Amino acid sequence: MKHLSSLTFKIALAVNTFSVLFNVINDCDETYNYWEPLHFIATNGEGGGFQTWEYSPSFGLRSYLYLWLFGWPSYLSFLIGLPNWVAFLLVRLLLGLVSAFSISLLSSTVATCVLKKNHKQTGELDSAKQKILLSFLLSFCCCVSPGNFLSSTTILPSGPSASLSALMLSFWLKRRYFLAIGCVAFTGLVVWPFAAILGIPLALYMVYSGDLYRLVKFVILWTFILIPPLALVDSFYFGRFILAPFNILWYNLFPHSRLQNGSASQLYGTEPISFYLKNYILNQNLLCILALLLSVISTLKCISRPLFRTKTVSESNFSDKHNISRSDISFIVCTSLLLWNSVFFLQSHKEERFMFPCYPFIGVASSLFVFGLVESSKSDTKRKWIKHAASFTTFVLCSLIFLMTISRIFTLVRWYSSPMFLVRHLPVPSSPSNKPLLCIGREWHYFPSRFLLPGGAKNWRVGFVQSAFAGQLPGQFAKPLSSGAASSSTRIDGNRFNSENLEETDRFITNESNECSFMLDRDSPPGVREKLYVADREIWFSLVNRTVLEPNNCITNATLFGLDLIFNCHFLRIFYVPILSEKVDHKINLHILARNSN
């Protein structure tokens, strides 16, 4: 299987490299809670950075250890004098490599486990062909999706959590429980505590298999391995003893806000259950439907037989680390998906990124369903037309998944990459002593981080102007007391902070017309407390602009060859179709405005 593992790694790496170069930042949490603080500590405070209330030492909800573990390439890049954008891409590349490795390991492990017994059976596909087919399906279903494009290179914790969940499942199927539990522990303590939910089926499986002692032993060992460096690094940066994962669990699980009775996360918006259903269609297209079909089949099979063949490890046929049935893998994957979705669908606060950790399970489930479809038609007793129909169905499914994925990714890149493009096309500051000020108003959530500012972020200032948004904007890290001492800034509040998402007025630049050198703004009607800066031509002129998609709006009179296209509005907004999407989708211009010199 080594050559197949290498093949799946190459496929995953090729797909993830595309994500490294073209993935968008479509979540402001990624910018302000991860890229910005990483930029600050990687430049030792010299490049500046936004500080959110989660990084306030009064609250301490985010881990600096996490930033270092996945952001260390940026420090090395700055150390040897490479441009900011190179540091940005190197961090993404590391994340993409971790994702590719985890997917290739998962694919080879599942293929080995599934085919361990199949090659002994008669009337099946040739063993070598089976391996190639299943390995291809696994790598295809795990890699070729908009969800993987978004999650494989994001620095949001849910992205690496997806890679770790894939590694956990791989080690579980190999019965390397120490490493499997290590993945869960690392995810829960260092990366994203809530993603440890995917480790619950592993724990139940070990208890059911008579491995309770090893479960407890490994949990204790990993706790002693991970807690000291976590506490050491975070306490160093916060200036007091802090365990960030426990703080974020406490904040989200226990209601304490005077503004609402439920979880404090509801302060940042609530969505109906349909939100995740739509996101599954957007990010996993047909894969989520295939995974659902496998879940139904797996449930029906489990009703008619015991959960697992054996109750204890000593009595089981699992002595071979690869000797596990396809039905067991299907049940493990589908149970994990059921648990994950049950927990997050019931939460009022919903985010697209919350689904990332379960994407590898969807990939495995969908590939097993398609493989089972093909395999069931290959028996010698089947008629030829059945075999051809199964092969044709598989080809059509893979083609549709590929086309839907490419179309959706084109939509993301076409309509949501503008902020990164515009910031990269700001002029390089002419003098380090006279730092230009980039102002952001109603487009604050589009800012892609200081990593993309040309000429080095230390030559820039970035600030906010007032907009219709009435929540709490990020503050700025205070200037370090001495060169190379970022910790002197992370230990204090650069601005006023609160945990109630209440507006803090010390964030705003009061006289933007005189203070701002450049402005990021769009040419759509302003809201409350907003100005249409692009219309004030006495003060501003458009330096560079690019179109973005206006939410929930289509061109009502769009036609092609006399046909009304408005009926396809939603489809053409979701999936990019050349010419048609350009005609139907309502576009607005996002500008970098420069202040007139006169």
Image: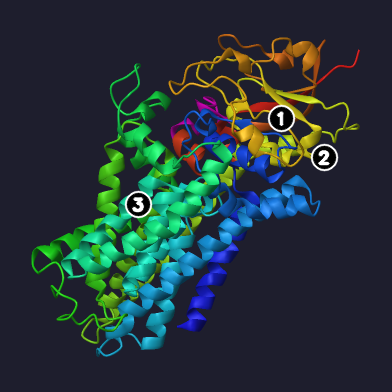
SS at circle 3: helix
Q: Three-letter amino acid code at disc 2?
A: Gly
Q: Residues within 10 Å of mark 1 (few under 14, many from 20)?
A: some
Q: Three-letter amino acid code at disc 1?
A: Lys
Q: Closer to the N terminus: mark 1 or mark 2?
A: 2
Q: Three-letter amino acid code at disc 3?
A: Ala
Where is mark 2, residue-wise? 455
SS at circle 1: loop
> Which residue does the image show at 36% across and 87% down from the upper left?
127
SS at circle 2: loop
Badge 3 vs badge 2, beta-carbon distance below 8 Å: no
Residue 365 visible in the displayed image: no
What percent of the width, then of the height, locates residue 429? 86, 33
Where 218 sits versus 450, above or below? below
Q: Closer to the N terminus: mark 1 or mark 3?
A: 3
Which is more foreground, mark 1 or mark 3? Answer: 1
Cα gap from disc 1 to disc 2, whole angstroms: 20 Å
Residue 479, label in figure: 1
